[in-house]
Amino acid sequence: MTSPATTLRRRRRPRLSPLLAAFVLVPFAVESIWVFWPALQGFWFSFTRWDGLTPPQFVGVDNYTELAGDPTFRGALVNTVIWLLLFGGLSVAGGFGMALLLQRDRRGVGFYRAALFTPVVFSLVVTALVWRVFYQPDGLADQILRGIGLEHLIRPWLADPETALYAVILPALWRQIGYVMVLYLAGLKAIDPALHEAARVDGANAWQRLWRVTVPQLKGVNAVVLSVIVIDSLRSFDIVWSLTRGGPYHSSELLSTYMYSTAFQGLRLGYASAIAVVIFALALAVILGYLVRAFREEDT
């Protein structure tokens, strides 16, 4: 015979709702089939030599050893880091700046918000086609430089190895800044206005309120923005491939474009899988590094 205390404990034991279990298990099952399992397969293929037609042959770390001595891979890695720093830094600066300027509801502000967000709606291929016209000889870029007396700076922007990478970053920024602006606008709207009022009463000027009140309250948004930018930077492919295909002479080659050309043009899927693992490790290192630093700051 069970005691009353045991019966009470059984009654108080929480039960997992079938609906809640379905909401957790079904997405997990879908992710396992479409994300986790292919990722594990890709990791396995990175240790093989495979052309997609014949059975893969296990070669150990030969692909990674070849990567270490591959000059094209090293150049793509450097370009990817440059892309990550410039694309990420300017996206954050531009998006945050636009969010600060457009956070207040005033007449006409909705039009500017919509105008900045409109490029996000376009696909990257369409964006690339628009900017290809912008960069063509005697295009808008050349006309603007002539109009302000800087015609000596005119060059074939997408065909010059010194400018190709930066010419591709610009349209990517044009599309990304509006998206980052929306994320920061949501974060700014969530800040309690009483915090700014209290800081203003204490004598803090606008600059001090920005760095002592606004920025610390955006830690959660910063984590989301960083994750989005890192992922978008490392998977940037469409706009680069549409404008330069990684050229000229691999000057705008990224890890993503090199992985694609190696896999589907060179039919070296095992080697391309090793590049994909490097991309994943780079993204994981940047995101985890930021999160560890943020958690340490909260503990101190």
Image: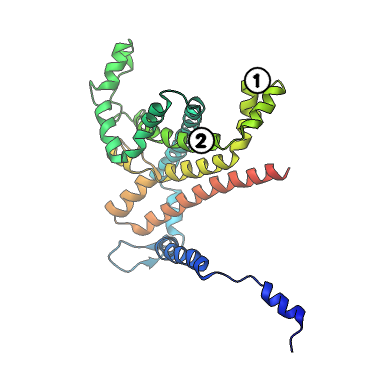
Q: Residue at x 50, y 40 (%)?
A: 225
**Label at residue 205:** 1
Report the residue marked by disc 2. Answer: 184
Q: Dot 1: few (<14), some (14–19), or many (≥20) neighbours within 10 Å?
A: few
Residue 1 location, quadrant: bottom right
User: Is 69 placed above or below 177 here?
Assistant: below
Task: State the image coordinates of residue 297 (x, y, percent, origin top left).
Answer: 68, 41
Residue 116 visible somewhere in the drawing? yes
Q: Residue at x 33, y 11 (%)?
A: 148
Q: Residue at x 42, y 64 (%)?
A: 30
Q: Is residue 249 left or right of residue 288?
A: left
Q: Dot 2: few (<14), some (14–19), or many (≥20) neighbours within 10 Å?
A: many
User: Is 104 placed above or below 64 here?
Assistant: above
Residue 233 location, quadrant: top left
Task: State the image coordinates of residue 16 (x, y, percent, origin top left).
Answer: 57, 70
Going by the numbered disc 2, the residue's amino acid type is Tyr
The kind of secondary structure element at disc 1 is loop
Residue 246 visible somewhere in the drawing? no
User: Is 45 placed above or below 242 here?
Assistant: below
